[in-house]
Image (cartoon, rainbow, N blue to C red):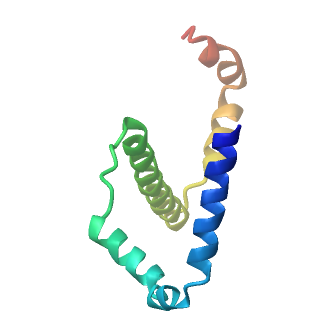
């Protein structure tokens, strides 16, 4: 216990003496700039890439491509007069039993 108290007293004394020396404190005013300069010297850390990071990047790029294709198909369909509801209605009117029973069950 005495050793701990002695160490604590030495630490307090060192902090008090450092606080009361303004000359050294004024020299250290640019310490933030010096620290940042040292950090910049180290440079960026090399990150180990994982498969998840590559997969995430691929998914986002694929989604952009899929959106572009979907928009182009929608513009093409609207410009050519494509109406799927008319086609489905025509098939249903010509053969209502076929579209309801045979086609889902793949009988014919």
Q: Relative to 77, does residue 17 appear above or below in the rendering?
A: below
Residue 97: percent from left, percent from top: 71, 19
Residue for point 37% across, 44% down: 54
Lateral position of residue 83 relative to residue 39, left or right: right
Residue 22 appears left or right of 28: right
* Figure check: 54 above or below 96: below
Residue under the image location 32 percent in, 62 percent down: 44
Image quarter (top left, top right, bottom left or bottom right) of the C terminus:
top right
The quadrant where residue 37 appears? bottom left
**x, y percentage for residue 86?**
65, 48
Which residue is at a point 44% across and 89% down the rendered structure image?
Answer: 27
Q: Residue at x 67, y 57 (%)?
A: 9
Query: Residue 41's image quarter?
Result: bottom left
Q: Is residue 72 above or below residue 35?
A: above
Q: Nearer the viewer, residue 18 or 103?
A: 18
Q: Where in the figure is residue 50, as x and y percent of width and height?
A: 37, 38
Quadrant position of the N terminus in the picture: top right
On the image, the x and y values in percent for residue 5 come to: 69, 47
Q: Quadrant of residue 39?
A: bottom left
């Amino acid at each position: 216990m005495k050793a701990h108290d002695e160490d604590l007293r030495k630490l307090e004394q060192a902090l008090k003496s450092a606080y009361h020396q303004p000359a050294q404190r004024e020299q250290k005013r640019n310490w933030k700039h010096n620290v940042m300069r040292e950090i910049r010297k180290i440079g960026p850390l090399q990150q180990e890439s994982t498969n998840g990071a590559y997969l995430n990047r691929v998914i986002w790029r694929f989604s952009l491509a899929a959106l572009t294709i979907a928009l182009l198909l929608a513009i093409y369909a609207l410009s050519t007069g494509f109406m799927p509801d008319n086609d489905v209605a025509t098939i249903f009117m010509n053969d209502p039993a076929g579209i309801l029973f045979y086609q889902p069950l793949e009988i014919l």
